[in-house]
Amino acid sequence: MARRRRVYEGKAKVLFEGPEPGTLIQYFKDDATAFNKKKHAIITGKGVLNNRISEYLMLRLGEIGIPTHFIRRLNMREQLVREVEIIPVEVVVRNYAAGSLAERFRIEEGTLLPRSIVEYYYKSDELGDPLVTEEHITAFGWATYSELDEIMNLALRINDFLAGLFIGVGLKLIDFKVEFGRLWEDEEMRIVLADEISPDNCRLWDARTSERYDKDRFRRDLGNVEEGYQEIARRLGILPEAGPRDLKGPETLQ
Ligand code: UDP
């Protein structure tokens, strides 16, 4: 295989130049980081699971009319996506109190919120992703009012759909983070869902026992991180056939 140009390397993924202009290959690594990279580990098989889980969720969201950057999965660790201009805002939707919201307002984790809450964080490792308001986003030119309106609508539709999908398999969607990008097609610009949706950026608890299956297992040293991700994949009916050993996947040339 020819060497491909590495366009960007993030904490959990690498982006390579795609086969055609306007496309990228998104490679899922096994690296896990938390607390702005202060904590780092390799979780064997995580990249393979996130690739599958994100593929599955992006396809289901596409079916209900949410525009996404996803084109198709290429192999165990890679997917082909459309190249978009990432809007530097992390959009968090919360249904139950957890993490930073539980801390900020001293609400017990797992408390149902009066309604779903959308928050924005400015994507900046240097600043530690600070919480921002619409005012900051529009004043600093990260997105326009109309783009934000579209982003908020899409985020709430994504939340409604995913919360229903997960409760169908006995999982509570506590909260999640998504990112959006601008996609140009013949002079027209559309806002599309980009990045990934996986247990790295969702909190998913067992609906009955409140057991956590997501990245909090890593953040909080609860152990068995890979098994948690596997359980989510298993419930979605997408655990790779050959079982855990299949999860390492082939090594691809970089
Ligand atoms: N999240 C994320 N990336 C971040 C910060 C948060 O994907 O850089 C996700 C996280 O997995 C959770 C939601 O966003 O599902 C809300 O996270 P929170 O603000 O509670 O932050 P945390 O407790 O993770 O620091």
Image (spheres, grey):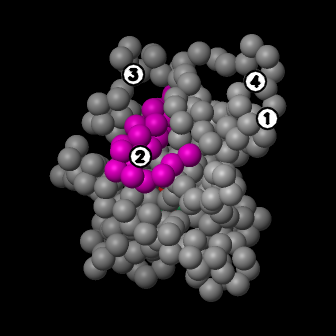
Q: Nearer the viewer, residue 46 or 16?
A: 16
Q: Real-space Cα distance between discs 1 and 3?
A: 28 Å
Q: Real-space Cα distance between discs 2 and 4?
A: 29 Å
Does residue 160 show up? yes
Query: Residue 1: percent from the left, percent from the top?
Result: 74, 13
Residue lying at 39% horizontally and 48% vertically, measured from the top left: 61
Magenta-drawn segment: 45-69
Q: Residues within 10 Å of mark 2 (few under 14, many from 20)?
A: some
- The residue that mark 4 highlights is 254
Amino acid under disc 1: Arg
- The residue that mark 2 highlights is 62
In screen coordinates, is 201 left or right of 1?
Answer: left
- The residue that mark 3 highlights is 240
Tell me which numbered mark, 4 or 3, is placed earlier along the sequence: 3
Q: Real-space Cα distance between discs 4 and 3?
A: 24 Å
> Which one is closest to the eye, mark 3 or mark 2?
2
Query: Residue 230: percent from the left, percent from the top?
Result: 38, 33
Report if the beta carbon of the residue with label 1 is closer than 8 angstroms to ligand 1. no
Choose top left, top right, bottom left or bottom right for residue 154.
bottom left
Label 3 secondary element? loop
Amino acid under disc 2: Gly
CB atoms of marks 1 and 4 within 8 Å: yes
